[in-house]
Amino acid sequence: MLEICKMLPHYPECARIRGQLGGAGTSVGANYEEADDALIKKDFVNKVGISRKEAKETRYFLRTISGTYLDLSEIAADIRESEEIINILSSIINRLTGGRKS
């Protein structure tokens, strides 16, 4: 994500997007690292849920800049990767909660 942030043009409106995309994109992994150290299942599920929310936010900002500030061809693989991560994290949560929201 940080490489994509560097690719964004230096327009005033991109400053906020750059910060949000960089923050959300790096937060996915950081929260999963925290989940990995969870002592109880409920905490693990919570942290994985936060990771999923951040992955969805990342996907949102990638879609927002796609075709507007960067060509889709430049970030299509990143959009797909964010969707794969969302699916993986959703699967983890569903397995641990039986499909219930926690």
Image (tube, rainbow, N blue to C red):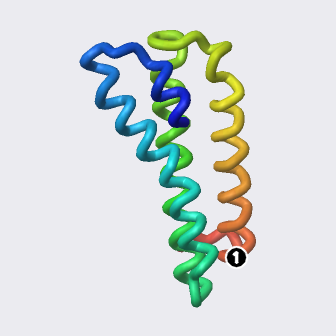
Image coordinates for residue 13, horizontal then vertical, percent: 28, 19
Residue at the left extreme, as displayed:
12
Image coordinates for residue 98, horizontal then vertical, percent: 70, 74
Residue at the bottom extreme, as displayed:
39
Residue indicated by mark 1: 96
Image coordinates for residue 79, horizontal then vertical, percent: 64, 31
Q: Residue at x 54, y 54 (%)?
A: 28
Please indicate whether residue 94 sits to the left or right of residue 70 in the image. Answer: right
Q: Residue at x 47, y 25 (%)?
A: 6
Query: From the viewer's perspective, is residue 89 above or below residue 24?
Result: below
Quadrant location of the N terminus in the rendered image: top right
Image coordinates for residue 44, horizontal then vertical, percent: 58, 77
Please indicate whether residue 6 sits to the left or right of residue 98 in the image. Answer: left
- Secondary structure found at label 1: helix
**Residue type for callout 1:** Leu
Please indicate whether residue 16 sits to the left or right of residue 46 in the image. Answer: left
Query: From the viewer's perspective, is residue 45 above or below residue 7?
Result: below
Figure label count: 1
Tell me which corner region of the image, top left, top right, bottom left or bottom right, holds residue 49: bottom right
Q: Residue at x 25, y 18 (%)?
A: 12
Q: As rendered, which of 7 and 54 lies closer to the eye?
A: 7
